[in-house]
Image (spheres, rainbow, N blue to C red):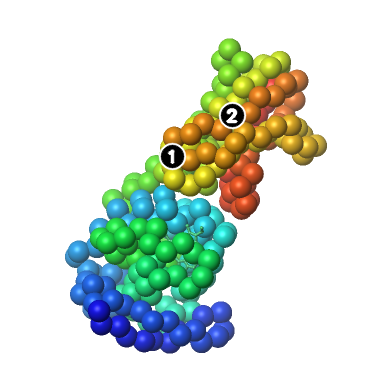
């Protein structure tokens, strides 16, 4: 495997990064503002980024707002300003996926998928605006519509693509005993909790992923409540909504 070193300036300091495997060098385009490599599937890269990386990283064009790891728009802003091509950034991201420095789990995606994700991130980072064409519709809208309790049961599922959102932003129920079920088809762990208007937590379901259901049983009276995910950073990134009880 052929490796090359490059220094890149980030957050005011020089960081040495070993980047670009022969594979990445092979698909790298001629630089400039867009990745020209024909062998990277950006649509697939975006979908996988949202599903596997977005819970930890903010990337505006992907609509992800995770805050466990660095904001990837900010992380590459300086390198782009300094004139590093997006093909170079693709190599840095690919290297990070395979051989992260520390806290990030290694090889969350592998092979061609890792190439696709790296290409998408490099293409989208610090670019402003919105994805166009096929990329614009690569990932479903995180939340839409409202859920309504039936027979004392309310379903508020987690976004199946791994975005930090439930499938609905609002829900309604009538007073009395209420079971809230939150199915999570994604690989990103989530739970669901309910708090009253004063912010006190009334109950919380277990943490689930891969199709598990987080369930919380509460007794509600007329008023406004908030449902949210208690995993670190998820609520702050948008994984919450309002339950109105009549
Ligand atoms: C569990 C949380 C988590 C997941 C999931 C995750 N990362 Fe990270 N990532 C981190 C953390 C924490 C750091 C900073 C420490 C480090 O470098 O290991 C980081 C660092 C990075 C960096 C370096 C940013 C910089 O400032 O130079 C890149 C690029 C990156 N991640 C891309 C990805 C991609 C692409 C994925 C999905 C394949 C991903 N990450 C998945 C937590 C995560």
The residue identified by callout 2 is: 215
Tell whether 230 sits left or right of 201: left
Q: Is residue 213 visible?
A: yes
Q: Is residue 41 above or below residue 175?
A: below
Give the labeled residue for mark 1.
210
Q: Residue at x 48, y 47 (%)?
A: 188
Instruction: Give x and y (percent) for residue 98.
Output: 37, 68
The residue drawn where x is 58% and y is 12% is: 151
Mark 2 surroundings: few (<14), some (14-19) or many (≥20) residues within 10 A: many
Q: Nearer the viewer, residue 102 or 68?
A: 102
Q: Is residue 198 above or below residue 81?
A: above
Is residue 93 visible in the rendered image? The answer is no
Q: Mark 2 CB in 8 Å range of ligand 1?
A: no
Q: Secondary structure at mark 1?
A: loop
Q: Could you say which quadrant of the image residue 161 lies in? A: top left
| Viewer-proximal residue among 207 and 66 | 207
């Amino acid at each position: 495997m052929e490796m090359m070193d490059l220094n890149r300036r980030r957050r005011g300091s020089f960081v040495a990064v070993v980047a670009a495997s022969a594979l990445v060098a092979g698909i790298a385009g001629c630089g400039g503002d867009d990745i020209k490599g024909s062998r990277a599937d950006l649509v697939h890269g975006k979908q996988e980024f949202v599903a596997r990386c977005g819970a930890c990283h903010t990337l505006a064009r992907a609509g992800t707002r995770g805050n466990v790891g660095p904001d990837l728009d900010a992380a590459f802003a300086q390198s782009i300003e300094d004139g590093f091509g997006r093909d170079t950034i693709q190599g840095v991201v690919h290297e990070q996926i395979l051989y992260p420095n520390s806290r990030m789990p290694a090889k969350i995606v592998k092979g061609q998928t890792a190439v696709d994700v790296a290409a998408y991130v490099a293409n989208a980072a610090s670019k402003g605006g919105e994805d166009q064409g096929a990329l614009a519709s690569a990932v479903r809208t995180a939340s839409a519509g409202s859920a309504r309790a039936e027979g004392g049961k309310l379903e508020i599922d987690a976004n199946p693509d791994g975005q930090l959102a439930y499938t609905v932003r609002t829900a309604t129920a009538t007073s009395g005993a209420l079971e809230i079920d939150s199915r999570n088809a994604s690989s990103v762990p989530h739970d669901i909790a309910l708090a009253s208007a004063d912010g006190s937590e009334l109950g919380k379901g277990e943490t689930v992923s891969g199709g598990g259901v987080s369930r919380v049983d509460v007794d509600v009276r007329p008023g406004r409540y908030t449902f949210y995910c208690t995993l670190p950073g998820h609520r702050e990134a948008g994984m919450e909504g309002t339950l109105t009880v009549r």
